[in-house]
Amino acid sequence: MKLRSRRTSTKTRAPKHPIVQIKIKDGRFEIVGLGAWYSYWRDPYHMMLTIPWWGFFLVISIAFLFVNTFFALLYLAGGDCLAGARPGSFEDAFFFSVQTLATIGYGVFSPKNTYANLIVTFEAIISLLAVAVVTGLAFARFSLPKARVLFSKNAVITSYNGVPTLMFRAANQRRNLILEAQLQVYLMRDEVSVEEHYMRRIYDLKLIRHRSPSFALSWSAMHPIDSDSPLYGATPESLFENKTTLVVSLSGIDETVAQAIHSRYIYAAQDILWNHRFSDVMRVAPNGDRYIDYNHFHDVIGIE
C-alpha cells in the first residue's frame, strides 16, 4: 500500500489590513481611523450606529430605493400581472412596490395572477424584516447614553500639604447626578528595557479619592507624587522625551436613564503645567449661598 504524502504549505495568508497607522499629534498618540464611522465598513451594525444622522438617512433611503427597484423589475418580468397598472410601465410597478413595502395599499394597483401574489408575499416578508431592523437601529442610536463631562484643558503639578501633587478638574455639565462615579488615571510613556526592547508602558496613578457616590458639580482629582508614584523624579523635559501622556477615564451610572456612561480625556506632556494651581471656582454670595463659576474652570495661576 502506497501512502500518499500531503504537502503542507508553510505560506500563511497575509491579513487584509496588516498595518495600523499610529501617529503623534500634539504630543498624543492617535490610531488613525479609531472610532470613525468609516472604519466600520466591514461591520455594518457598528457603522450604522456611528455614522452621522444625515448619513444614516442617506443609507436607509438608498436601500429603500434599491429594494423597490428590484421588486419593480420582478413585477415587470411577470408581464401584465398588476391590475390598474399600465403594461410595461416601470413607474407603476415601482410605486406599487413602494405601497406594498410600506403597507400603504391605496387600492389602485393590485396583483392579478399567482406570479404577482408570490412576489407580493416575498416583498411583505422583506418589509417586516426591514421595518424591524430600521426601527431597532434608530432606537439604538437614540438610546445610546452619552456623558457630558468637562475636563480642564490642563493638568497642574503643585504642592498640596507639602507633597508635590498632580491635579486636574472634571465637571458634570448635565443638571443631574452620575451615581457611583469612578475616576481612573493612567500614565503612558516610552521605555527601553535593559535588553534594549522598546515598550509603551502603562502605569496606574493612585488618586486621593477615585470614587464618588454622586458626581453632580466639580471634581478635583489629585495624585500625590511620592516615592511610589511613576512621576517621582520626573521633569518637564523627561515627560517630553518619553512622550508621556495621561489618560483619564470616568465612568458611572446616569441617574436619569439608569445606564452606564463613560468619558475619557488625554493630557499630553505640554498640557501638564508645573508650579501652577487652579483658580478657585467656588464663590460665596453676600447672603452666604455658595455657587460654582465655571467661567474660570480652566484658569490656572503660576506659582513663583
Image: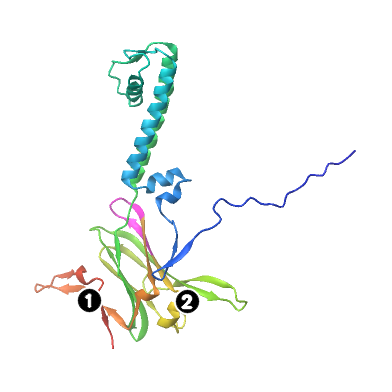
Name the quadrant containing residue 4: top right
Q: How is the image coloured?
A: rainbow
Q: CA distance from mark 2 to mark 1?
A: 32 Å
User: Observer-nearest residue: 193 or 11?
Assistant: 11
Dot 1: element: loop
Residue 138: tell me if it is visible: no
Which residue sits at x=47%, y=76%?
242
Residue 238, given in percent of the width and then of the height, sits at 45, 81
Amino acid under label 2?
Asn
Name the quadrant containing residue 156: bottom left
In the image, taking residue 51 as reference, residue 233 lies left or right, namely right
Q: Main secondary structure of the magenta part?
A: strand
Residue 47's place in the image compared with 32, above or below, is above
Which residue sits at x=43%, y=21%?
74
Name the quadrant containing residue 252: bottom left
In the image, taking residue 107 as reference, residue 75 lies left or right, namely right
Residue 189, given in percent of the width and then of the height, sits at 48, 73
Residue 156's place in the image compared with 112, above or below, is below
Mark 2 vs mark 1, foreground winner is 2
Q: Which residue is mark 2?
A: 242
Residue range corresponding to the magenta coloring: 249-260
Dot 2: element: loop
